[in-house]
């Protein structure tokens, strides 16, 4: 028989009172985290930005408000870039390429990259709308 088979047979043949569970499995095991943190230690010593009078809910609300503001800034910048790429005003890249003269560098770019610019603008618009959805859901 192999070594493992011998060991297994030995375990099966032992009497139940001979088998003892490991010490850490007993029902009287202490809580491993009990007594680990001294209550006199302030949260600031662990790097927490918590004022003594602040509660967790107000910190969450402040953090959420900051995230919403940053997300709104992202949406504004994305929409500005969309307008820069494919806006209706004469200052957009797409408008300048469309108004370029024949046999110019811009005319060559317009003929080959017109669809790509439009696709990028559509993808950015979808991203901006998705971000707006997250803003609304965050209310």
Image (cartoon, rainbow, N blue to C red):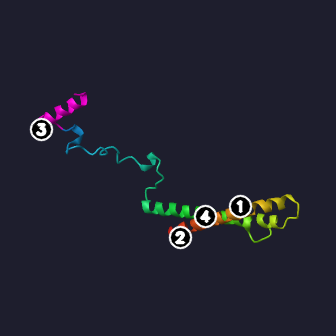
Q: Nearer the viewer, mark 2 or mark 4?
A: 4
Whether the magenta-drawn stretch holds residue 69 is answered as no
Residue at image location 74% in from the left, 69% down from the top: 87
Question: Comparing marks 3 and 1, which lies closer to the viewer?
Answer: 1
Tell me if residue 118 comes above or below residue 41 in the rendering: below
Mark 2 and mark 1: span between their CA atoms?
Answer: 30 Å
Gap in angstroms between the C-alphas marked 1 and 4: 16 Å
The earlier-in-sequence mark between 2 and 1 is 1
Which type of secondary structure does the marked residue at label 1 adopt?
helix
| Cα distance between the residues tagged 3 and 1 | 75 Å
- Circle 2: element type: helix
13 or 134: nearer the viewer = 13
Secondary structure of residue under mark 3: helix
Mark 4 lies on residue: 127
Q: Name the quadrant containing residue 89.
A: bottom right
Disc 4 crowd rating (10 Å Cα; few below 14, some 14-19, many 20+) is some
Numbered range of the magenta stretch:
1-20
Say whether disc 1 or disc 4 marks the residue closer to the N-terminus.
Answer: 1
Q: CA distance from mark 4 to mark 3?
A: 65 Å
Q: Nearer the viewer, mark 1 or mark 4?
A: 1
Q: How far, Cα to Cα, is label 2 from label 4? A: 14 Å
């Amino acid at each position: 028989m192999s070594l493992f088979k011998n060991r297994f047979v030995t375990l099966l043949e032992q009497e139940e009172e001979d088998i003892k569970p490991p010490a850490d499995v007993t029902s009287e095991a202490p809580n491993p985290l009990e007594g680990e943190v001294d209550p006199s230690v302030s949260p600031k010593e662990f790097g927490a930005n918590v004022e003594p009078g602040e509660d967790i809910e107000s910190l969450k609300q402040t953090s959420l408000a900051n995230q919403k503001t940053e997300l709104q800034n992202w949406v504004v910048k994305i929409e500005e870039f969309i307008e820069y790429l494919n806006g209706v005003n004469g200052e957009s890249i797409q408008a300048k390429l469309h108004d370029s003269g024949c046999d110019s560098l811009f005319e060559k770019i317009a003929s080959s990259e017109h669809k790509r610019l439009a696709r990028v603008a559509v993808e950015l618009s979808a991203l901006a709308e998705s971000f707006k959805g997250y803003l609304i859901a965050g209310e």
